[in-house]
Amino acid sequence: MPEGHSVHRLARQFRDVFGGAALAVSSPQGKFSAGAARIDGHVLERAEAHGKQMFLYFSHDLVMRVHLGLYGAWDFGGDSTFTGASSIGAPRRIGEQELGAESPDDDQASVSGGPAAGLLTVAGPGDYDGPPEPTGAVRVRLVSDHGWADLRGPTACEVLTPAEAAAVRRKLGPDPLNHGQGDEEEFVRRIRKSTTSTALQLMKQDVLAGVGNVYRAEVLFRLGLDPMLPGTSLQREEAQALWEDIARIMADGVRDGRIITTELRDRPSGVGVDVGCGPASRGGMGDGLPRRPNKDVPAEDSHYVYKREGLPCRHCGSQIAMKDLGGRKLYWCPSCQAG
Ligand SMILES: [Zn+2]
């Protein structure tokens, strides 16, 4: 399942390629025909990510909500105007393809930076003559004058009124990539009020929106926190540090298109820059492709504990541990993160 950084990249992509455009909306598969009819022909005004969900706001005040879940994915294609505006490079798939997941349990981000294999042809100027025939179960197709996007296999895809969309978003916890005023305090309040372990709470979307299995394991290691520490035992400063570090490493994830949580000194390859460093890029129109100072960091250098069970800790040499917690695998260093 994509962690929040991938959904933020996706929202940025929608803003770049479809923002301000009237979209023809259809459901080639038929499952979303009624929803598509409600937004067909209207202008996309905003695209926002909130945790793992994306909200597309249209000019007539209706909102399309999409949650990719485990199997959902978007494909994009279009003419050179469209691909030039793309903040994620040439048309490619965002969803499970970007993740390169080895199993549905993995929130692993892809190491691949380029367009995913088997994707669309980029049409040259004047060569684009509309989207291809839909193949497979395309739930939604969005088409502008310059390009198109196909959605397959989402967990949720629906059209909401502004009030309904606001209600959905209120139930979600604060998103560290949205930086709203008071969000940090709200996160601190939510996580410290429950006796549930910190590790489980970091995955709860009503405590913190956007974090998945990789980020939760990595941030707990980075802060030397015992994953099993009850939320009620977290010091205020520890909870604040969690929020701030998650925001830092997830912002890097948006920039890099993959999850890298190791500091430079802890990478045997010596490749890349420290977390939170390197050129920030907004990407998008006129800004070229996002600059990715960590694009060449080898996969085996990317994480401290995630999927490193049995391997030596990068700090103390102890074996990294792994166990099942609430149906997901938890990774940690029993020495560095002792309770
Ligand atoms: Zn250790």
Image (cartoon, rainbow, N blue to C red):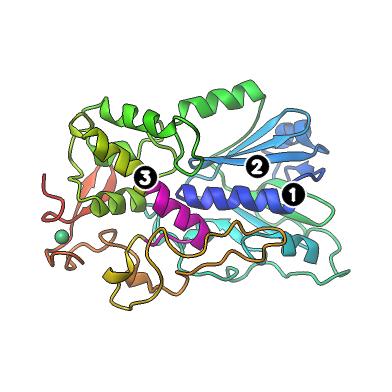
Q: Nearer the viewer, residue 339 or 56?
A: 339
**Closer to us: mark 3 or mark 1?**
3
User: Label 3 amino acid?
Assistant: Glu
Residue behind mark 1? 18
Which badge, 2 or 1, comes first in the chain's sequence?
1
Residue behind mark 3? 244
Residue 23 in the image: x percent, y percent? 80, 44
Q: Is residue 166 above or below residue 97?
A: above
- Ligand 1 under 8 Å from disc 3 Cβ: no
Q: Residue at x 33, y 69 (%)?
A: 264
Q: Nearer the viewer, residue 39 or 280?
A: 280
Please state the extent of the stretch shown in magenta in the rendering.
Answer: 246-260
The secondary structure type at the circle numbered 1 is helix
- Ligand 1 under 8 Å from disc 1 Cβ: no
Q: Residue at x 82, y 57 (%)?
A: 146
**Closer to us: mark 2 or mark 3?**
3
Residue behind mark 2? 47
Q: Residues within 10 Å of mark 3 (few under 14, many from 20)?
A: some
Q: CA distance from mark 2 to mark 1?
A: 9 Å
Q: Is residue 106 above or below residue 37?
A: below
Q: CA distance from mark 3 to mark 1?
A: 32 Å
